[in-house]
Amino acid sequence: MANKSRTQYSILNIVTGIGGYAVNTLVGFVCRMIFVRCLSAEYLGINGLFSNILSVLSLAELGVGYAIIYSLYKPIAENDQSKIASIMRYFGRAYSVIGCVIAVAGVAMIPFLDFVVRDQPNIKENLYVIYLLFLFNTVITYFFSYRASLLTAAQQNYLATGLNYIFTIFQSVIQIVFLLITKEYMTYLVTQIIISLCYNITISYIAKRKYPYIVGKGIPPLERTEKKKLTSNIKNVTIWKLAGVLVNNTDNIIITYFSGMITVGYASNYTLFSGMINTLLTQMFNSVIASVGNYNAVESKENKLKLFNSINFANFWLFGWAAIGIFLVSGDLVALLYGGEYVLPMNIPFIIALNFYMVGMQNAVWTFKHTIGIFKQGRYVLFFTAAINLVLSIALGKIWGLFGILFATAISRACTNTWYDPYAVFKYGLDVSVREYFKKYFIYALILIICGAGCYFACSFINFGLALNVILKIIICTVIPNGLFWIVFHKRPEFEFFARIFKRIVNKVFKRKSQA
């Protein structure tokens, strides 16, 4: 079915994801600035509130995407068109039901809007009309865009991602123009709905053109046992995702309780940077998930282990390097962009960087967990993470404030999914001892500490203007980690794996240039 290699697909997905993310972030930032300048603060609040409400309602979708994309890896690798069509048919019906459920739940929320919005905003538009437009924009997605998941499973996520970024960037540009001309919120909102609908219809059309056998009559239904297995996978992933929501969305509530909203705002200046870097790096790893899934569907366990070690090594290199930068540069960035009064003590960017690194180091594990199909094992572990996090956040928050709350998150992760998820992948997926993984994990951590200490020492001599400080510290936090990583690992099989890929890419580029 595929006419490109896994490596080519991965590179296309990575380049499209990173390039689109960079441009979209820049244009989206400009659009938000124009929004704030052209409309009152009430509109910004409405935008955030209704987005949050519908995000909660959309929890009905959790788990469906992961489980069904996993079920597509093997039939795609074997070019089993009948099975692919059956799964997509099941997928389409599932998402139609989800869309209807969200529509009904969204309409049922209307009588309660007055309780949620206690102080009526000073706007000329009808609040209920705005809400219904938000609801329509959310619901309509489920009836079209699910076919994009087939492109993702077939390693062609660059088509869906690239098209999404094109439409989103175009949407932001049109919204900027309309805001500057009309200063009307409804034109802003209606533009968003029209562009979103156009994207969903377009991506659905592309999927049908590339895989015409997924539509039409005569598609056999899935067997009962397959439906049962798929439903079980959906349930298990849903539990895992819901628990993740609890882990990742309680810190700000506790920080507000102990330290107030101002501290949340101060901390958000730091987490904004770490969040942007995390999104960028996660985009890279998400771009190779389908290729890993395709590989795992046909390769031996020995080869799967080699691929895991290589991806885990890249995980360490990128997230370790970024964590050092977050620790040592974010304070100067905050001072440069927002002012010195917003700078927090060094222990705060340190603990933010630690949490960033701990979560980032799970990427390879989660990639294999989802592509091998380990959905049942560990589905309740994150509930323990959330419970430990809550208890420790309250206890340590009383003692150390913001630092204690963030430190509690690190401890709760270390006690649960940081060790259990790798254990589950190695025991139930790769069928080997997890001992070697933890050995490498601690070696990586030790090398990172040495790098961080060296960078901290070098940065202590940087005391110039803020802009120059930022530039020099970025250089230090780039040269020292990458240099030391290369010295230590350049003869390791994991490094040579990526070196071979890089050489193949360079050779192909020069070959094409010479032919031209």
Image (cartoon, rainbow, N blue to C red):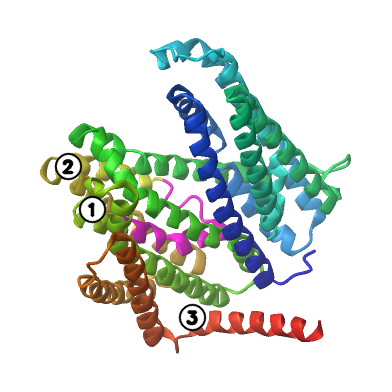
Q: Position of residue 515 (x, y in %)?
A: 81, 85
Q: Residues within 10 Å of mark 1 (few under 14, many from 20)?
A: many
From the top left corner, tell me how far across and down residue 90 is, in percent: 72, 40
Q: Which numbered disc, 3 or 2, marks the residue closer to the eye?
A: 2
Point out the image quarter for the N terminus: bottom right
Answer left or right for 135 relative to 85: left
Crowding near the residue tagged with mark 3, few <14, some 14–19, many ≥20 C-alpha atoms within 10 Å: some
Magenta segment main secondary structure: helix
Between the residue at mark 3 and the residue at mark 2, the CA separation in whole angstroms equals 41 Å
Q: Residues within 10 Å of mark 2 (few under 14, many from 20)?
A: many
Where residue 228 appears, x then y in whole percent?
63, 42
Q: Residue furthest bottom?
A: 491
Tell me if residue 349 can be seen.
yes
Q: From the viewer's side, name the closer residue of 458 and 5.
A: 458
Q: Upstream in the sequence, badge 2 or badge 1?
A: 1
User: For residue 372: magenta?
Assistant: yes
Asked which quadrant contains residue 454, the reply is: bottom left
- Looking at the rendered structure, the secondary structure element under dot 3 is helix
Looking at this view, is 257 or 394 the one in front? 257
Distance of mark 3 from mark 1, alpha carbons? 33 Å
Which residues are the magenta region? 353-379
Task: Identify the residue position indicated by label 1 in the image.
Answer: 348
For residue 157, above or below residue 506: above
Residue at the disc numbered 3:
494
Q: Is residue 51 visible?
A: no
Quick one: SS at disc 2? helix
Residue type at mark 1? Ile
Residue wearing tag 2: 397
Left or right: where 83 falls relative to 116: right
